[in-house]
Amino acid sequence: DIVLTQSPDSLAVSLGERATINCKSSQSVFYRPNNQNFLAWYQQKPGQPPKRLIYWATTRASGVPDRFSGSGSGTDFTLTISSLQTEDVAVYYCQQHYSTLPITFGQGTRLEI
Amino acid sequence: EVQLVESGGGLVQPGGSLRLSCAVSGFTSSSFWMTWVRQPPGKGLEWVANINQDGSAKSYVDSVRGRFIISRDSADNSLYLQMNSLRAEDSAVYYCATGHWTFDFWGQGTLVTVSS
């Protein structure tokens, strides 16, 4: 199985400041035939289901504010929130689908203000 | 508006069975791969199983293979998860979601508690 390790497990960021969450994969999730990284990011607020923010490592999902951005390739990825808002308080998960048996998630990063 | 509504969760004894349902509205579910993801209380997300558009392809995480069966019914636009031989470690909120590789629409989840 591909193991995704997120860091940190939790972080506190001031309103308007930048938040950075890392995701490291136990093996590369870069698929050369389509030049894409098979990695996504989700946001989960308390009492709600997850919401997909980013796919293909860098593509924002429809309706996601542009303060959210994804970067990285191969085994190392980053989710950046450029200017933290109160509504961004949540747990964030990375997820890989390079190996689909099984699809795996990182352990989550709790973001607080 | 796309809506996924799970039902069928509850308290069950170890070794028992439950059948979860996911009612889909706002689109034709048979157009998409569908997936079950679970989340133990206070813990992270775990992919459980998925199924293709016509039900001919199904995949499971190792921990449930042979005990859980994913299925779908295009007539009533629904997704199902038959869970047998339940264990304490199966206790979780179970979400249905659209998608094969990443998951763009999710239900609110249904809680399954396996305990004596």
Image (cartoon, rainbow, N blue to C red):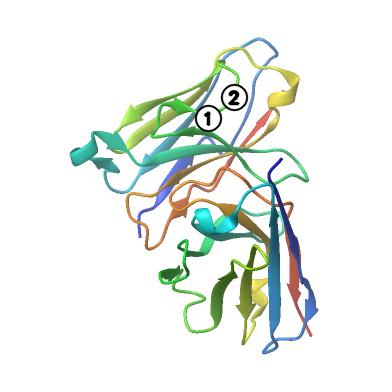
Mark 2, secondary structure of its residue: loop
- Report which quarter residue B20 is drawn in: bottom right
Return the residue at label 1: A61
Q: Are marks 2 and 1 on the same chain?
A: yes
Rendered position, B2 above or below A2? above
- Placement of the C terminus of chain A among the 4 image quadrants: top right
Tell me the amino acid under the disc marked 2: Val
Residue A10: x and y in percent read 61, 35
Q: Residue at x 54, y 78 (%)?
A: B69
Residue toward you, B92 or B35: B35
Marks 2 and 1 close (CB-CB < 8 Å): yes
Chain of the residue displaying label 1? A
Q: Nearer the viewer, residue B6 or A72?
A: B6
Residue B27 drawn at (x, y percent): 63, 49
Q: Residue B45 vs residue A98: left or right?
A: right
Image quarter in which the N terminus of chain A is found: bottom left
Position of A52 relative to B62 (above/below): above
* Secondary element at tag 1: loop
Callout count: 2
Q: Residue furthest front?
A: B75
Q: Chain of mark 2?
A: A
**Front position in the image: A90 or B82:** B82
- Which residue is found at the position 30% from the left and 43% from the top? A29
Residue A44 x/y as whole percent: 66, 40
What residue is shown with label 2? A64
Compared across the picture, whether A32 is left or right of A74 comes to left
In this view, the residue farthest toward the left is A33
Q: Residues within 10 Å of mark 2 (few under 14, many from 20)?
A: few
Q: Is residue B93 above or below residue A4?
A: below
Picture disc at residue B82: none
Mark 1 Cα-neighbour bin, 10 Å: few <14, some 14–19, many ≥20: some
Residue that appears at 65% across and 62% down: B77
